[in-house]
Amino acid sequence: MECGDALNAFYSTESLGLTYLSAYLDSLGSNFSHGANFATAGSTIRPQNTTISQSGFSPISLDVQFVQFSDFRRRSPNIREKGEIFEKLLPKEEDFSKALYAFDIGQNDLTAGYKLNLSTEQVKAYVPDVLRQFSNVIKRTCKSDKRTTLPSLHEMVGLSTTGLC
């Protein structure tokens, strides 16, 4: 997460009086009753054909995060049914349709191209594919329930917060 994104999340969460979401990938002992965070630092929309040590970008792209969310959503009711502590740690089925789904991703897709020594023309050429993949995930997330989403591609359109911190 970039500094600007971290500050955004901090102030938004604080001003709404909300608690921070537990990371899905750090689930041992987590409380997901109020939500889960599927993001990873250095993520991209498009899957990268490199390792994290080669490129510095997470191998957990948006499509992988969506699969994790789908699995979480599908499994939560079954685990809640076990009762006891599970009932307190996982969201109710109806909570998914009331949830706010926020997406802030895309800036690393541009940076990844330059890091792979692609020209500006080559990077521009794959932007429509990045937008298509982003749009598909938003549509799939909203498909089963009426949901509120906050898609954010602010850095894809030149409003980068990189270098402000």
Image: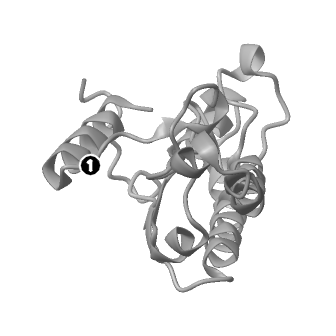
Q: Is residue 33 left or right of residue 117?
A: left
Identify whether 144 is placed above or below 44: below
Nearest the viewer among 126 and 7 is 7
Nearest the viewer among 139 and 17 is 17
Q: What residue appears at the point 66 percent right and 32 percent down from the top-left corner?
A: 25
Report how many numbered discs are placed on residues in the image: 1
Asked whether residue 106 is in view, the answer is no
Q: Which residue is mark 1?
A: 18
Q: Is residue 119 left or right of residue 63?
A: left
Identify whether 133 is placed above or below 48: below
Q: Is residue 147 left or right of residue 80?
A: left
Residue 5 lies, in percent from the top left, at 34, 40
Nearest the viewer among 24 and 135 is 24
Residue 48 lies, in percent from the top left, at 78, 38
What residue occupies the far right of the structure in this picture?
Answer: 49
Q: Quadrant of the C terminus?
A: top left
Q: What residue appears at the point 82 percent right and 28 percent down from the top-left corner?
A: 50
- How many neighbours does mark 1 have within 10 angstroms: few (below 14), some (14-19), or many (20 or more)? few
Residue 152 lies, in percent from the top left, at 43, 61
Asked whether residue 116 is in view, the answer is yes
What residue occupies the far left of the structure in this picture?
Answer: 15
Nearest the viewer among 123 and 6 is 6
Residue 65 lies, in percent from the top left, at 69, 48
Residue type at mark 1: give it: Leu
Q: Is residue 97 left or right of residue 124?
A: left
Identify whether 46 is placed above or below 157: above
Q: Quadrant of the N terminus?
A: top left
What residue occupies the far bottom of the structure in this picture?
Answer: 146
Q: What residue appears at the point 46 percent right and 68 percent down from the top-left corner?
A: 99
Element at label 1: loop
What residue occupies the far top of the structure in this picture?
Answer: 53
